[in-house]
Image: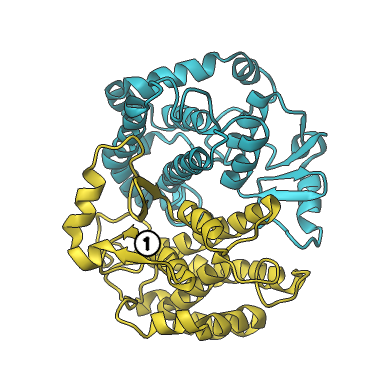
Chain colours: A yellow, B cyan
Amino acid sequence: MTYEFYYWPHVQGRGEFVRLALEEAGADYVDVARVKGVEALKAAMAVESAEPPFAPPFLRVGKRLIGQTTNILLFLGDRHGLAPKSAAGRLWTNQIQLTIADFSLEAHDTHHPLGPRLSFAEQQAAAMTRADWFRSERIERFLAWFETLLARNPRGPGHLVGGRLTYADLALFQTVEGLRYAFPRAMARIEPAFPLVVALNARIAARPRIRAYLGSSRRIGFHERAGLFRYHPELDG
Amino acid sequence: MTYEFYYWPHVQGRGEFVRLALEEAGADYVDVARVKGVEALKAAMAVESAEPPFAPPFLRVGKRLIGQTTNILLFLGDRHGLAPKSAAGRLWTNQIQLTIADFSLEAHDTHHPLGPRLSFAEQQAAAMTRADWFRSERIERFLAWFETLLARNPRGPGHLVGGRLTYADLALFQTVEGLRYAFPRAMARIEPAFPLVVALNARIAARPRIRAYLGSSRRIGFHERAGLFRYHPELDG
């Protein structure tokens, strides 16, 4: 069965967490709006189903549409061995993923704290205030937590959960990559204090399927026009 | 077994979604920081476990600590019949809950778009810009989605999911109550367009355990000093 994945075609955004899981799983999927254009995404959203998604990303699995990034990952984790099989392990992985979602949303809010109706230029002063808090407190607070999880993992510091890769490892990779893009100066200062996170990131990037994906045209690049992570030098302190 | 629930003692906040589920379930629980003070919360957070929560709320279940509001609800939903038993039904309920979490976080961000280091007074201008977007677009967009779910529910408009109460119904109740507190003028204008949401709210408030809880000293009131929903007349348009 081929999954149909629906997300904005020119943006990594939240959808990238799902794309990475699909790629690592070697799943058969079509990134619909990248192939057929954004109208195909809008058409799927307009279908009057009993379980409509509120917003992209969503995944069509047979007749079902599954929405919300963390929820899609919960589904894919079970289906493709990207999460533990035990109920406790699944919940713990979901808990970590929710925290990664919080972290990446806070990164987003640095460039658009007043919402999407104003351009970055129109809210730059507010963005600088919000980014200053994020750079000076939040990045380290979150990374310290992930470093702690790796250091305390009873199965060793190779993964966030147990002894095998989970979707949470992939999502942390994406977040660290995004922070390096958006806050290069801050991350150069901060990340040496978190060697286990840095090492995990390097291992994820070197996984064969991830490496092939990152080098392919399927991987959309980071850019400052859209997405969770945008580079504005003014926000990098 | 008695659950130990950990959250800030003077705030509804994200913790209130968990409190409502525990109350509706008739679960045996202690709201630890309300009984023993905030030091007991800090002590629990300082324990060097392999699965430490990033932030409150969290729930102690035997030796485990389960964190992240949506994740705690996923756990309680299974344990206490507050979610469907089928895998598809559980995911759909989780998807709705994640959307309620997004909605309530956006309500929070109206009063503190620049983060918690500045007081409301210090960021009032930014807050007014953000709140204007929330009031004029976002409240209706979210409520319209919930109204649609109720209207299209194959089991009727009595609940968001299937024919029985789920934790998502309780969380939507809490969010609507919070919006009525924080944006009384805007909600008086907006909510008549969403009669199924309004009717669900009234039914939740009338459930015996919820009614008893709301009338008890266990229910912390809304206030403007902390929490997701705060009343500042300047933000109500």
Looking at the picture, how far across and down is residue B81, in whole percent?
Answer: 62, 29
Secondary structure, mark 1, is helix
For disc 1, the marked residue is A126
Q: Position of B137 compared to B178: left or right?
A: left
Q: Nearer the viewer, residue B191 or B36?
A: B191
Q: Quadrant of the C terminus of chain A?
A: bottom left
Can you tell which quarter of the image residue A199 is in? bottom right
Looking at the picture, how far across and down is residue A63, in whole percent?
Answer: 34, 45
Q: How many numbered dots are placed on residues in this image?
A: 1
Looking at the picture, how far across and down is residue A94, in whole percent?
Answer: 59, 55
Can you tell which quarter of the image residue A138 is in? bottom right
Residue at x-position 56% and y-position 64%: A82
Identity, as a three-letter code, of the amino acid under mark 1? Ala
The residue carrying pointer 1 sits among few (fewer than 14), some (14 to 19) or many (20 or more) residues within 10 Å by Cα, namely: many
Q: Nearer the viewer, residue A52 or A222?
A: A52
Q: Position of B86 compared to A112: left or right?
A: right
Q: Quadrant of the N terminus of chain A?
A: bottom left
Q: Nearer the viewer, residue B170 or B75?
A: B75
